[in-house]
Amino acid sequence: MRIVKSISANIEQLLERYEKNGHLTMQASLMGKGSVVYRLQEYCLKVYTPRGKMDGEYECEALLSLQNNHHVPKLYAYASGNFVLTEWVEGFNLRQYRATCGHIPHNLIYDMFSTELQQIQAGYHDWDVIRYENLLWTATGEVKRTDFWLCEPVRCMRIRERLQQEIIRKIERIYGGDDTDMEEVMHYFDRHGLTTTEVQEALAHFRLQTPRMALAQ
Ligand SMILES: Nc1ncnc2c1ncn2[C@@H]1O[C@H](COP(=O)(O)OP(=O)(O)O)[C@@H](O)[C@H]1O
Ligand SMILES: [Mg+2]
């Protein structure tokens, strides 16, 4: 296990024991596709299933590299491909947020694109077609994302720049009133049952929001 940020002694002991004997006598809080997620006080312990082991290795690497991005949960410790300990994000995904708060997050579109842009600027490309499902909003409207197993480092600078330019152009077109690139986002809204009015309002809010998203590299 590698400890990235200091953790409480009892959690450290628990993880050390788990590394030795592979047993966790706790009830899982959530199930992922290739992992089991436990809430441990203010921490989130994500234990990879044998099927999720390799994805877990990618995720640990991405989480470590993206620690300067404020939408990435704080990483405390990990054993690559086995488990990862991050902060617990007290948040809702879009569907839960809307059901609980009675409205969509105010900065929904800004949050979706700024998290994506920051990530690519940090050199990571997310291949997950349902990546927006991984955004969690806190009660104060702050956004965090989880699930980084399809985030791949883009080591070639030319490709990285091309990917950055693509998303910058896309955001610029949306600012300019052209929604032709919004297909993927529209599907996401559709799956979450957003009404046409909500989508229109979210787009209008995004366009009027100041300051605008910083798009310069
Ligand atoms: N740090 C966290 N804080 C709170 N909930 C989390 C955290 N990380 C993951 N979750 C939740 O746990 C569930 C599974 O996590 P996810 O990262 O999607 O696992 P998988 O990669 O196995 O699909 C999701 O509902 C996600 O919202
Ligand atoms: Mg998932």
Image (cartoon, grey):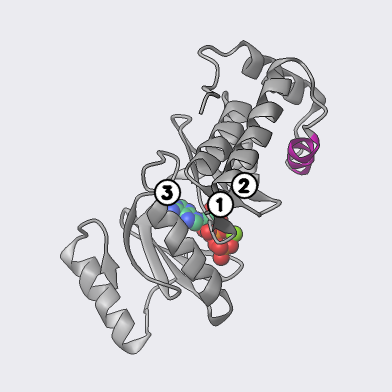
Q: Residue at x 67, y 21 (%)?
A: 172
Label 3 beta carbon within 8 A of ligand 1? no
Which element type, helix, strand or loop, lies under badge 1? loop
Q: Overall secondary structure of the magenta stretch?
A: helix
Q: Which residue is mark 3?
A: 66
| Dot 2 alpha-carbon crowd within 10 angstroms: few under 14, some 14 to 19, many 20 or more | few
Please tell me which of labels 3 and 1 falls first in the chain. 3
Q: Which residue is mark 2?
A: 159
Q: Is residue 15 above or below residue 117?
A: below
Which element type, helix, strand or loop, lies under badge 2? helix
Q: Is residue 135 visible?
A: yes
Which element type, helix, strand or loop, lies under badge 3? loop
Q: Nearest the camera: 125 or 191?
A: 125
Q: Position of residue 182 (x, y in %)?
A: 77, 32
Q: Position of residue 147 (x, y in %)?
A: 54, 56
| Dot 1 alpha-carbon crowd within 10 angstroms: few under 14, some 14 to 19, many 20 or more | few
Q: Residue at x 58, y 71 (%)?
A: 34
State the separation of the CA atoms marked 2 and 3.
19 Å
Quadrant of the image occupied by residue 32: bottom right
- Amino acid type at image mark 1: Cys
**Range of residues picked out in magenta:** 183-191
| 156 left or right of 179 in image | left
Q: Is residue 184 magenta?
A: yes
Quadrant of the image occupied by residue 60: bottom left
Label 1 beta carbon within 8 A of ligand 1? no
Q: Which mark is residue 12?
A: none
Quadrant of the image occupied by residue 114: top right
Q: Position of residue 217 (x, y in %)?
A: 51, 29
Q: Which residue is mark 1?
A: 156
